Amino acid sequence: MAVISKIRKNVGLVIGLIGVSMVAFILTDLFRNTSAIFSSGQNEVGNIAGTPIDYTVYNKEIENAIYQEQQRSKSNTIGEDIRMNMVNRAWDNLVNEVVMGKEFESSGVNVASGELMDMFIGPDPSPIVVQQFAQGGQPYDPNQMKQILARAKNEPEVRQYLSDLEKYMVSMRLQEKYMNLVRSGMLVSREEAKNAYLEENSLVSFQYLGVNYSSIPDSSVQVKDEDIENYISKHKAQFKIKEPEADLVYVPFYKIPSAIDTADALAYLEKIKPEFISAKNDSLFVSAKSAFPFDTTYKAFGQLDDFLKKNLEGVKGDSVVGPLFDGNLFRLIKISNILQDTLPRIKVKHLLVGVRGGLPEDTLKSKARADSMFRVVTLANFEDKVAQASDDNGTVTNGGELGWYTPGKMGGEFDEKILTIPVNKPTLLKSTRGFHIVVVTEKTNTVYQIAEVIKPIVPSSNTLRELYRQADIFAGAVTESNQDFSIFARSKGIEPIALPTLKPSVNQLPNLLGTGELVKWGLTSESGKTSGVIETFQAFIVANVVSRKDEGYLSVEEARKNIDRKILNAVKARMIKEKLAATGSQDLAKVRDSYGNGAFLSQADNVSFASGTAPGIGNDPVVVGRAFSLEPQQVSSPIIGQTGVYLIKVTSKNQPAPPSEDQIRQFQQNLSQSKTNNMASKVFIGVRESANIKDFRYKFGF
């Protein structure tokens, strides 16, 4: 039974580990038949590295992800926002499984069944197994693990638990082996280390004239088609469309309750109020009549929420108050029971003097500080002293309020004596955190159990039908008008809402839930098309496709609609270069004066080639690299930088002596460590980007 209890206790943890694992895939030859992933085409929700993904396989992954979340949260219901997270997690799991599975296979990385068994009962068991099965602080016992493995054959609960644990352990071991393999290739040659030393220690100082792009107002820049074409041709990757995109605007008809819905909710509670007053079993009554479950806890009056305290002040037991309006619901409130608890409920505030250090003398110093503070603390100055001296950052700004305190949080003398302290008497107590000057501000043995019947105010079916009808009329009127969607909407006094660009990989939209159908429609409709009525959780929506783009490159017209800052800067750079060239001088001060407003002179000293950063310019390897190519006193031609155009004049250069063998070895070690530290995330990103992932989930409403 102890084993089963341990397993039940840890099921949520294991599922959580599996859910957040970077590589939450399943070892192909041990745990699943990946031929089931292949799609016939009609049911293809995506294609990962040449592997079609079937709808049924993906849907099963979603179900598994939702089940895992339910187990983790110990709730059978999840919100739409969490469900969408599970939908995306399931896709990421499949992507990682296929992409990394191919990587593992091509790299010869695997986990044999014998190796897996060693992870459980071998001489060096997996830390994951040790963490899960070490009992009560005792050392991990491989013999006990053997008994658990034997029991798994006949006990489904144990078998499922171990299966989930194995999958997670295998995924982690595969990832570890693969990363070790990659890490072993992170070599730094002697020549590479030597160059790195020279780059870091090569210094240049230069005077420069700069004209920032921001000195020219955007409104004064005329961007021609050839400017856009030239920029796109030189920076094609920036304008590549890797997946379908659509820009939409929409008009929402929000699912807001009507006045009749509000009246009906109120009438419902008025009708059942007499029954609630006479009910003998409040728990059963609330369970049958309320939208929220019965709260079985007992609380001091001061522990109740402000709404309850306000409306129950002076009310006797078994009395029913309400219905009362509270935001988007009505509340019918009854004091179900009043008891005298054996232990008092207390509200506490404190001033903490923490122990700074682990030595006995550190504790003595803190005790001396606490004694000194205790001698001057009074009820009147308590909050001021907390603000001045408390070491508890969580309560220092609210007068030291800990709220209604349950013993067990602080430990030591604090928890042993806190319930016996008189109200409003400052007392010095020791805990595991240090020394506390404590004040109990409220104390009572009287506790209340509150029964509430809550009726949310929600739109009725009649209200929803009417809202749908209004949306449908609007959609038809837009189509019949042959007008631009936004112009028509504004003519009716409605401001359309623009959505962020829709993409298959971005299926969650701001302020909207349940948008699968909207995304599907937007990515499969032509530019200019207006939708029928599309339902989301919050509203009925009528949408319009402003523009839609398939894979390829942005056209000049499409790029012009949302001109990139870099295109504007490219045009400004040309304007600045032409004006600088017109000065016809190599004297930077004269060039500045001739150029006029916007030009400035500055000095950058001891700029390192490796850093690529210069004072007043920022990180700009082009400018820094150009400076190292010049001879002292030589003036450059105009240099197009990240934030402006520059003329530079080198004032001095420092070329270091060749590095010693010790310096080369040190740079080899540093570069190797740096490569290793930065490699992990880059490897996974690079592998995914090279996998040619096609996401068609939007066609199925995901």
Image (tube, rainbow, N blue to C red):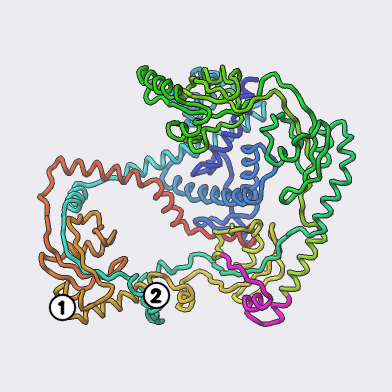
Q: Is residue 359 left or right of residue 414?
A: left
**Residue 491 visible here:** yes
Percent x, y for residue 300?
69, 29
Q: Of callouts 2 and 1, which one flags the residue occurring earlier in the amino acid sequence?
A: 2
Residue 489 on the magenta span = yes
Q: Which residue is mark 1?
A: 585
Q: Residue at x 46, y 35 (%)?
A: 387
Alpha-carbon neighbours of circle 1 within 10 Å: few (<14), some, or many (≥20)? few
Instruction: Please state, as top left, top right, bottom left or bottom right, where the C terminus lies in the image.
Output: bottom right
Residue segment shown in magenta: 476-499
Q: Nearer the viewer, residue 361 or 240?
A: 361
Q: Residue at x 61, y 32 (%)?
A: 11
Q: Residue at x 48, y 35 (%)?
A: 396
Q: Is residue 484 left or right of residue 217?
A: right
Residue 333 on the magenta span = no
Residue type at the position of mark 2:
Asp
Percent x, y for residue 111?
47, 36
Q: Residue furthest front?
A: 380
Q: Nearer the viewer, residue 571 or 82?
A: 571
* On screen, residue 665 above or below 511: above
Percent x, y for residue 281?
85, 31
Label 1 SS: loop
Percent x, y for residue 202?
16, 54
Residue type at the position of mark 1:
Ser
Q: Residue at x 43, y 48 (%)?
A: 106
Q: Could you tell me how far apart the alpha carbons at marks 2 and 1 are, in whole angstroms? A: 28 Å
Q: Which mark is residue 218?
A: 2
* On screen, residue 445 above or below 78: above
